[in-house]
Image (tube, rainbow, N blue to C red):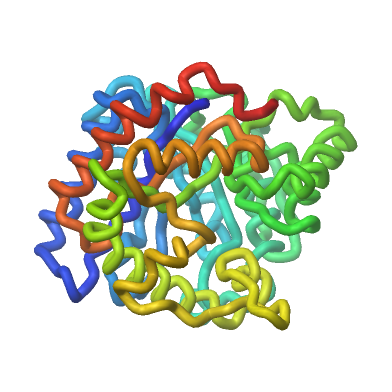
Amino acid sequence: MDFGLILIVRNPPKWHRPDHEVYQSYIDNAVLGEKLGFSHIWTSEHHFMECGWSPSQFPILATIAAKTERIRIGTLIYLLALHNPIQAAEDAATVDILSNGRLDFAAGPGGSPNECRFFGIPYGERRSRMHEGLALIRRCFQEEGFDHNGKFYQFKNVRMTTRPVQKPFPLWVAAFGPKALTEAGAGGYHLAATPPAEMQKFYDDALRGAGHDPRKFKRSMHQIVHVAETTEKAWDEAEPHVHYYIEKHYAMIESDRLLRSSAAPLNASGQPDMTIPPVGELRKSGRGPYGPAFIGSPEAVIKQLEDLFRNHPMDEMSPSLGLPGMDPKIARNSMELFAREVMPHFKNFNGRK
């Protein structure tokens, strides 16, 4: 089992610090992540967010590439529907060159209704635009010259002169439901989300149907994790930041039924329960923004991860070991504890069995 590290650059008003300090602290965490033995550094994006969520991943990844030597870097996720796919291909190829072949490109439909409105994209077109964009990026990297006449994009005589180091270049997709998993498998993309084993069957069947061997395709999961010397201390440090994260995430996905169902627990009537227990009570529910939060002592987090891996086959798990607004020293202590006491427990663990 590999463990990556997702760095979600955010600067919430409640805990605001100068932006250059916040960005530098995340770069420092990336450098530390390589020293601690993490396999990946992933970044993410959102736009026009109150918390200052970083909207631009490639400059951050290029900076990390310049300050590290071995660790892989990647987008988790890149909101491709909001971007020109030709520009995305050029940016990805450039960062892959700068990192000497260490970039993974994971795209997802993502994007809140507010973000789509600002970019002039109908919310219901996100997934279709993403898939057309991914197919176009793949052509940019594999073909010498081509015309593209799609539903959303039309280009004549595309000749990409900047090519990535990696051949083939690793493309990933975030997918959760049966339709999305089937589309991801049919497209031959790695899976940047890890639903339960029974749902992954849709992905595996689609891979086989497209002539691919599922064993050659990687699966990664992102979860909220915080580790301290005791579970009580871990929740004391993390609970206000987890509450903030859930609050903002629920607000962003309020109008999307599928995302609500995957993020919030179901109530007695089978509907997503979007009420959030207050700080002080949240720890009793163990809730995080994407399901359960993995918060506690090293021993407690190991037990949670064992339960997760039992039902969710994967190759890599990427904890978010630095919650929005958290003191960088506390976040780094969590990273160090996780690397020293949690990761070795799974050194010889095969997450795909």
Task: Determine the residue positioned at 15% across, 61% down.
Answer: 19
Where 264 falls versus 37 (above or below)? below
Outermost residue, top direction? 348
Q: How many marks?
A: 0
Outermost residue, right direction? 209
Residue 345: quarter of image: top left
Q: Nearer the viewer, residue 234 or 104?
A: 234
The answer to whether residue 249 is visible is yes
Task: Determine the residue positioned at 54% across, 36% down.
Answer: 306
Residue 238: quarter of image: bottom left
Where 229 falls versus 216 (above or below)? below
The answer to whether residue 42 is visible is no
Q: Horizontal placement of 179 versus 296: left or right?
A: right
Q: Nearer the viewer, residue 54 or 223?
A: 223
Task: Determine the residue positioned at 79% across, 56% down.
Answer: 178
Residue 4: % across, % down: 42, 35
Residue 165: % across, % down: 48, 23
Tell me the quadrant of the picture where the C terminus can be found: top right
Q: Horizontal placement of 8 versus 139: left or right?
A: left
Where 69 falls versus 126 (above or below)? above
Residue 274: % across, % down: 53, 80
Task: Determine the residue positioned at 84% across, 41% down.
Answer: 206
Q: Nearer the viewer, residue 229 or 73?
A: 229
Where 229 falls versus 8 (above or below)? above
Q: Horizontal placement of 99 versus 158: left or right?
A: left
Residue 328: % across, % down: 16, 50
